[in-house]
Amino acid sequence: MKAAWIIAALPLAACDPVPTAEQFIPDYRGVETQLLADDLVQFNVEMSNALSAADVEDYAECAAAGYTLIRGWGFARHLRTNVNEEAGVWRADAVYTISPALPRGIRTIDAEVVAAACAEKGIPTV
């Protein structure tokens, strides 16, 4: 009886679509920045083909690094990131403080170092 059940299930497995290479290439759809205060910035990023929330969080961090450099400052401190996914589109809302000197805290980034790492990984900045 077990063999018949396994054989009957095999045709169903064959119907699952096979992923294509394009489904594993991140599609970075853009960044919106909103200056909340002189040193407080919100980044809204959107992408598809993310493998996990970490991918969209990395995109937001790259945006923060790029923006920090554009402002002529060198450092940022991560405050929070909210991530959601709907129908294959990932969005993150991240808030960072930016500063010319290394801020206090444990989630700080050196904008120049992070921006260079983003370029190596092919993740766009602002």
Image: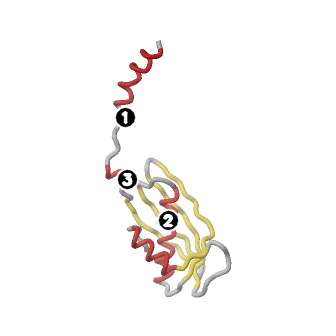
Residue 15 image-quadrant placement: top left
Labelled disc at residue 58: 2
Residue 81 lies, in percent from the top left, at 58, 63
Q: Tell me which numbered mark, 3 or 1, is placed earlier along the sequence.
A: 1
Q: Amino acid at mark 1?
A: Asp
Labelled disc at residue 16: 1
Please determine whether, in this image, residue 42 is positioned above or below residue 110. above
Q: Tell me which numbered mark, 3 or 2, is placed earlier along the sequence.
A: 3
For the residues labelled 3 and 1, the Cα–Cα distance comes to 17 Å
For the residues labelled 3 and 2, the Cα–Cα distance comes to 16 Å
Labelled disc at residue 40: none
Q: Residue furthest top?
A: 1
Q: Tell me which numbered mark, 1 or 2, is placed earlier along the sequence.
A: 1
Q: Alpha-carbon neighbours of circle 1 within 10 Å: few (<14), some, or many (≥20)?
A: few
Residue 10 lies, in percent from the top left, at 38, 25
Labels 1 and 2 touching (C-beta < 8 A): no
Q: Is residue 75 left or right of residue 122?
A: right
* Coloring basis for residues: secondary structure
For the residues labelled 1 and 2, the Cα–Cα distance comes to 30 Å
Q: Is residue 93 left or right of residue 15?
A: right
> Please, what secondary structure does the residue beneath circle 1 have?
loop
Q: Amino acid at mark 2?
A: Asp
Q: Amino acid at mark 3?
A: Phe
Labels 3 and 2 touching (C-beta < 8 A): no
> Please, what secondary structure does the residue beneath circle 2 have?
helix
Query: Which residue is labeled 3 in the image?
Result: 24
